[in-house]
Image (cartoon, rainbow, N blue to C red):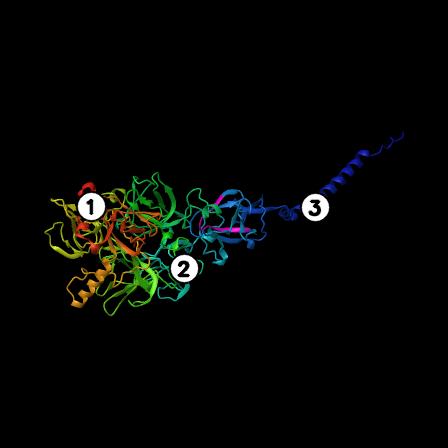
Amino acid sequence: MGSAPQLPRFGARARDRRKAGLLRVCRSGLATLLLAVCVQPFALEALGFTTIARPISGLAPGGSSRTSSRWRRRPELLATEQEVLTAWTFVPPDREKALDLRLEPRLDSQRTGEKLKAGSVFQVSSELVGEDGTLFLELDDGRGWAFDRVPGVGTLCTRHETTRNSAAHVAAPAPGSELDAVTAAGEHQLTAWTFVPPDSNKPLDLRREARLDSERSGERLKAGTFFHVSSEVAGDDGTLFLELDDGRGWAFDRVPGVGTLCTRHETTRNSAAHVAVPAPGSDFDAVSAAGEHQLTAWIFVPPDSNKPLDLRREPRLDSERSGERLKAGSIFHVSSEVVGDDGTLFLELDDGWGWAFDRVPGVGTLCTRHETTRNFAAHVAVLAPGSDFDAVAATGDHQLTAWTFVPPDSNKPLDLRREPRLDSERSGERLKAGSIFHVSSEVAGADGTLFLELDDGRGWAFDRVPGVGTLCTRHEAPRNSASHVAELAPGSEFDADAAVGDHQLTAWTFVPPDGNKPLDLRREPRLDSERSGERLKAGTIFHVSSEVAGADGTLFLELDDGRGWAFVPGVGTLCTRHEAPRNSAAHIAAPAPGSEVDSVAAVGDHQLPAPQQQQQQQQKQQQQQQQQQTTWTFVPPDSNKPMDLRLEPRLDSARSGERLQPGTVFHVSSEVASEDGTLFLELDDGRGWAFEQVVGVGTLCARNAQMTPALMSRLSLTVARLWQYSPRLHH
């Protein structure tokens, strides 16, 4: 029997081929897997991914922490190394508005909606220079572009490395900023302070070490300066020494016996990282920085008193009081100005105290921009070269004192001297009557005259002239003052209610009806009261704090300087309200250029309190005659019409806009005779020219020394008419 035929083994061969192929695939896959495991991190890094290890709960065998990795996309940075990042600080020059970041490196670019607050420290990944030199700074957190300056405004951002490349000396940024706990934590974080000298604008000399007697660093802080502090050291006497973070030196927060010089900026504003929080929506850029929204400096100068100003909670005179007050002479910064319906400008104090107002209708101006009185840089008074506010200048005999220039019987200015001598060269600066000034040094002369060096460097004043009398009085003398500002009676205030009543200070003029005899002041508001020992001279302008009507109609006037009581009889008026004859600012006449108070102009026959030698009496009489020649009275012949003053000594000249009321006593600095004999009289307060007569009409003005009986009768009639038709005089 034969065997079966052998069939081809196709199934086995196929299986073998499949096994061989599978083996090859496995070998290739294993190699690929091993390669992927080894190469994958580098490949992912090349693709822009980064691995972040994170712990997994629980412990692996052996107690080691197990970790897993996840991958996330890394943002593209213009800087490939961490060292390329630079730190910058946003420091607005003289205000605290925020900086709106831009989408592109251009000032006119669209805003990103993100802002930098004053004092913010930020990291920059890219810097681009604009065509005008502005350096645009791309924040590394992607919020947008800042810029280091605004042309015409100044520097806004400074490279933080230039001041201190230190993690311990970097301000703690607001939540969400890139600085972390390592760079921001610690008690050495930057704090913001303000240098506010208590009663002057002198700068503060920084020290090399944290001691008052340390060597000066050569750097100074100006009044109102904001600065950042990296270290604070308390002295033995409680003085806090402040190391400026820019390395300029050490400041100090106070001087024992003087007061506080520097205040932590948080005490006035709710701050993050000790930097003032700007108003919502505020923006510091080329538009807002050069416009009306910047901080401005103002000074509170009540027109005729030292009453404080009660601040308001809202920009309205009838608003609730904030509980804070401004004292006379206070300098304050304003962050917002709002115009009321009647033109009153309401001023929001940047320290959050409340709203002041620049005027009260019917009363006058209360606050003026401080730039109008001092040349301001960043709204801070420019100080005299070499001036210094420190422990030496501020304590002891050299501490600043406040004085008032009160000429005894005129409104002439006082020419300041270059040196503490009456015969010294003039400095070219002057004090006007009523001026309050600060003195840094007092030097007594051989004759007892006290020479007063003005702290602003304008020159030397003097408190008296021998044979003439007192010219300047210490401001503390008439009123018990704090910080050289008159202390007010409890509950007193200067506002719309207190300023427009019978009790406001009023200015009066003493015009004797029948001669130049002085008026003896009384101790009490009675004609039979004891004399106070003080006198008013003819033509004297004085301020009244209280008016009391007697039973017979006599109006008694209490002088606000405490010298005593004057009076206004119902018949034969002696005193007239100064508002009528003079339209004055602060009720003080502006003297003509070139005038001055000295021994010739200031002496009079009622000046010396006790009889003197015969030679002095003769000298005084001569000087009185010289003075009387410059005092005139406007007496219209047959009416009560005022006289329109002229701009030039001609009847056909343009009007100056000022007028003389009937009975006005005025001072003349220049007399010019015209071709027809009319004598033109230049008023010493600069208001314009009067004229003594009109041809064909008669005499309008007469010298006080030449008052004839007829003119005196005319003046008495005029005053009687004024008394009859002026209800204010019947209080």
Closer to the chain start, of discs 1 and 2, is 2
For badge 2, the amino acid type reads Glu
For badge 3, the amino acid type reads Ala
Callout 2: helix, strand or loop?
Answer: strand
Residue 117, compared with residue 413, is above or below; it is above
Residue marked by disc 2: 243
Q: Nearer the viewer, residue 174 or 730?
A: 730
- In the image, the segment drawn in magenta is 114-125
Q: Nearer the viewer, residue 150 or 193?
A: 150
Q: Is residue 185 left or right of residue 642?
A: right
Residue 625 pos. (x, y %): 22, 60
Q: Quadrant of the C terminus?
A: top left
Q: Residues within 10 Å of mark 3 (few under 14, many from 20)?
A: few
**Circle nearer the viewer, 1 or 3:** 1
Callout 3: helix, strand or loop?
Answer: helix
Q: Is residue 238 visible?
A: no
**Circle nearer the viewer, 2 or 3:** 2
Q: Is residue 117 magenta?
A: yes
Residues at marks 1 and 2, CA–CA distance in whole angstroms: 70 Å
In the image, farthest residue toward the right: 1
Residue marked by disc 1: 718
Residue 175 pos. (x, y %): 45, 46
Residue marked by disc 3: 31
Q: Answer yes or no: do the residues labelled 2 and 3 have beta carbons within 8 Å?
A: no
Q: Nearer the viewer, residue 333 or 513?
A: 513
Residues at marks 1 and 3, CA–CA distance in whole angstroms: 124 Å
